[in-house]
Image: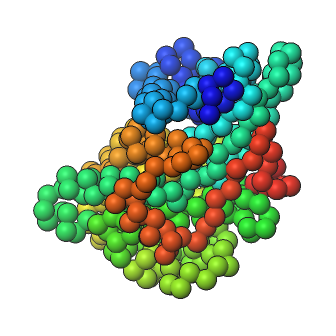
């Protein structure tokens, strides 16, 4: 690969860098919805509380630095560019710059492991918009090759599992023994999840990929075969009991494939999965239960066992992690008298950067021992495929994710 023709674009959501950026940033996020400025100021409270600055931009810059170091170590001459959907540097400007720099082919790494509209299709729209911006600017856009979802990548699973075990070790010896593992990811409207994925998959690709990844991390960690006691009444258990909770009512991670093991509620492979960070009208159904509500409900049921909370839906500690988990969920656990620790996200590790490079390198690096173990777990328990690997912002299939 030559830097004169091939590049990597890290494409992300974006976030404000100072207090004055918060409302304009939120206006970009909610463009077309007609939300009043006063309401956006209320929505931005979390950003203002944290000084008006989102951690996500600096985290993405660190991720890029890690990727550049990995490329250098492998002798790969591939420049790395950075573009956002909602804040500077905007993906349109970055793509125009790539074109001016003579880039003819760009691999696009999206900072989301998942399918669904907000996790996948909206990034395809970003790529389409960037190509259109190049045409408007009179430059020839590079071919934009979106790299696929990575929810079950061995490096991703192994790093999350290691973080879970490190977090568990922070508890006292007694709490360590009694702890339960709870997974959390960003909630989405039920209707969006119902439409997630190509029609041939059957819907709910987002929630099923999250569920699949959670099970793989659990089985790769010290919590293997130890589902939390809330699994029977949290989202996964209710789904398995055919209750209408946003996913299909045919059991968790059911894609019609035969996996040879029972992955349903009440088994040793079940997981405790909750959701967080919902927004919008309270009248619109979103994936539930909410993480704070779930913690409170555990206590009400008499379950005050320690919680190791794994933010499976996030690759770095941006605002949904720093505020919704490290503040609100932590406070909810304290009020309920529950020992609580949150595990690390994997995105700033060297192994994550190596994973990104492996996604387009001609010769991927050999797996570490932990990654090889995670691969074996994925081969045994994984049931949900990855999509998203298309060019120039094309969708995986007509109507994919409600497009």
Q: What residue lies at 41% left-to-right and 26% top-to-bottom? A: 50
Horizontal side of 198 relative to 254 (left or right) equals right
**Residue 122 sits in which quadrant?**
top right
Here the colouring is rainbow
Is residue 175 positioned above or below 133 on the image? below
Of the pair 136 and 360, the residue shown nearer to us:
360
Is residue 64 positioned above or below 245 on the image? above
Q: Position of residue 271 (x, y in %)?
A: 44, 70
- Tell me the quadrant of the picture where the N terminus can be found: top right
Whether residue 190 is visible to the viewer of this picture, yes or no, is no
Q: Position of residue 218 (x, y in %)?
A: 39, 66
Q: Position of residue 212 (x, y in %)?
A: 53, 66
Whether residue 3 is visible to the viewer of this picture, yes or no, is yes
Q: What residue lies at 26% left-to-right and 62% top-to-bottom? A: 306
Horizontal side of 211 relative to 373 (left or right) equals right
Is residue 11 positioned above or below 157 on the image? above
Q: What residue lies at 34% left-to-right and 60% top-to-bottom? A: 369
**Residue 179 sits in which quadrant?**
bottom left
Of the pair 382 and 75, the residue shown nearer to us:
75
Q: What residue lies at 74% left-to-right and 28% top-to-bottom? A: 104
Q: Position of residue 220 (x, y in %)?
A: 37, 66
**Residue 16 sits in which quadrant?**
top right
């Amino acid at each position: 690969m030559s830097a004169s023709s091939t590049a990597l674009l890290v494409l992300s959501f974006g976030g404000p860098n100072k207090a004055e950026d918060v409302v304009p940033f939120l206006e970009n996020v909610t463009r077309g919805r007609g939300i009043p400025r006063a309401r956006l100021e209320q929505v931005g409270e979390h950003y203002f509380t944290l000084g008006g600055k989102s951690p996500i931009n600096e985290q993405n810059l660190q991720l890029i630095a890690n990727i550049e170091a990995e490329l250098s170590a492998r002798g790969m001459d591939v420049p790395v560019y950075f573009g956002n959907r909602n804040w500077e540097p905007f993906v349109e400007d970055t793509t125009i710059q790539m074109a001016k720099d003579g880039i003819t082919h760009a691999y696009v790494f999206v900072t989301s492991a998942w399918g669904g509209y907000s996790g996948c299709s909206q990034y395809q729209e970003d790529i389409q918009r960037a190509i259109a911006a190049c045409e408007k600017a009179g430059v020839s856009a590079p071919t934009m090759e979106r790299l696929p979802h990575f929810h079950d990548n061995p490096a991703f699973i192994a790093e999350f599992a290691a973080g879970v075990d490190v977090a568990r070790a922070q508890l006292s010896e007694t709490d360590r023994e009694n702890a339960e593992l709870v997974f959390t990811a960003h909630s989405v409207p039920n209707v969006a999840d119902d439409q997630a994925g190509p029609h041939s998959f059957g819907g709910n690709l987002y929630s099923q990929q999250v569920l699949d990844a959670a099970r793989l991390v659990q089985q790769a960690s010290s919590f293997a075969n130890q589902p939390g006691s809330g699994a029977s009444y949290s989202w996964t258990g209710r789904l398995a009991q055919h209750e209408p909770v946003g996913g299909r009512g045919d059991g968790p991670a059911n894609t019609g494939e035969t996996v040879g093991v029972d992955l349903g509620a009440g088994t040793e492979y079940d997981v405790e999965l909750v959701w967080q960070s919902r927004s919008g009208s309270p009248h619109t159904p979103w994936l539930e239960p909410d993480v704070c509500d779930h913690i409170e409900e555990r206590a009400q049921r008499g379950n005050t066992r320690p919680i190791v909370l794994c933010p499976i839906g996030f690759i770095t500690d941006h605002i949904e992690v720093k505020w919704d988990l490290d503040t609100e969920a932590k406070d909810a656990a304290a009020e309920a008298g529950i020992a609580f620790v949150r595990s690390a996200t994997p995105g700033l590790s060297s192994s994550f950067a190596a994973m990104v490079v492996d996604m387009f390198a001609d010769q991927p690096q050999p797996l570490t021992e932990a990654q090889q173990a995670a691969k074996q777990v994925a081969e045994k328990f994984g049931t949900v495929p990855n999509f998203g690997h298309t060019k120039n912002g094309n969708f995986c299939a007509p109507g994919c994710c409600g497009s």
